[in-house]
Amino acid sequence: MIAQRAAALGRDLVGPRYVWSTIRRFAWPDVAPSLDRPEEHGLSPEAFTVRTADGVDIRGWVLAPGAAGAAGAPGAPEAVVILCHGRNANKSRLLHHMALLHRAGFAAVAFDFRGCGTSDPPRRRWYNSMWEPLRDLEAVARLVEGRFGARPVALFGLSFGGNMAIAHAGTTGRCYAALILDSTPLIRWGDMLTTVLAREREGARAPRLRALCDRLAMAFIVVFTRADALYRHAQRSATQLRDTPLLLILGEREAFFDPEASARFVERYYAGPARVWRVARGRHLTNHIVAAAAYEREVVSFLRDALTRKEAP
């Protein structure tokens, strides 16, 4: 992928070309390839297209009870779960999660953020790329309301998708039944980039000049993506989620960011009931692979407990 080639190039370069390659990697997402197809998981989701408030077409899948791969007879789902993929990914990375939810009798909705997969590219490529996906999630949430009516709705975000989910959930006036975040860096974008770039500088040529170039690139990225404003928005959103149970899933071998920082964010800002599940041997976005049975058990039981809590008088 472009980001990987840019990272490899950056190990041997410093100066303007390196600064640009770093900005290109982190300021907006790449169009990642689709790794899996629904039929490979025994699924036949219904495709949909929805238009955002700023006129971008977002494409996704709905997998409801009664479709291929579902257990039991057709009927209304117990709840609907909206899945949000990570940065530089697309909805094909969510097929395992869609199948998991489907087996449990939930409807699963996955979509491509703008500029990813089959969704349209953003209208402005240079500015606000950390905020615009919130419009995509809002459009999908409206579609779910129209399709499933008063059914309970939960959000399930992976990595950057989790950042979008928590920033969205408490700022729309909706009451989500549950929120699940997997491998989500609930930290400032600049702090995460500092860790990533410092690791990449190890053994690099001209480390002091490289560090200066990293600081310049990071300053540009944070300003033009409005990342700090999004972090504050997520803080405010978390304080409003008193009635939404949260499950935060963190791998014990997470290396992309400090997982304890995400746990501290939840402890400090999340107003509702929250649980942190640390997956032994789990790395970034591999928790559902290294602990497949436990992962399915934890996610399904958490959702069912949240639904029971929502229905209680």
Image (spheres, rainbow, N blue to C red):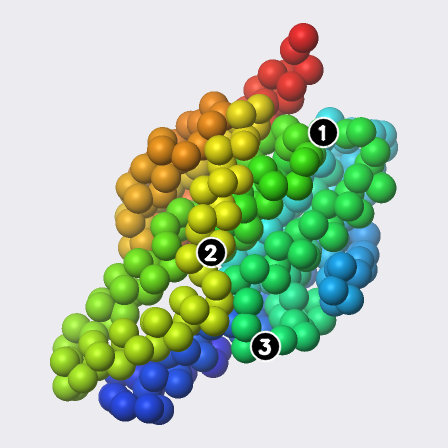
Residue denoted by label 3: 125
Among the two numbered marks 1 and 2 on one chain, the one whose residue lies closer to the N terminus = 1
For the residue pair 81 and 223, the one nearer the viewer reads as: 223
Residue 280: which numbered mark, if any?
A: none
Q: Quadrant of the C terminus?
A: top right
For the residue pair 211 and 110, the one nearer the viewer reads as: 211
Mark 1 vs 2: CB contact within 8 A: no
Give the residue at x 66% y 41%.
Answer: 172
Residue denoted by label 1: 152
Among the two numbered marks 1 and 3 on one chain, the one whose residue lies closer to the N terminus = 3
* Viewer-side label of 1, 3: 3
**Amino acid type, mark 1:** Pro
Among the two numbered marks 2 and 3 on one chain, the one whose residue lies closer to the N terminus = 3
Q: CA distance from mark 1 to mark 3?
A: 35 Å
Residue denoted by label 2: 229
Element type at marker 1? loop
Residue 123 is drawn in which quadrant? Answer: bottom right
Number of marks in the image?
Answer: 3
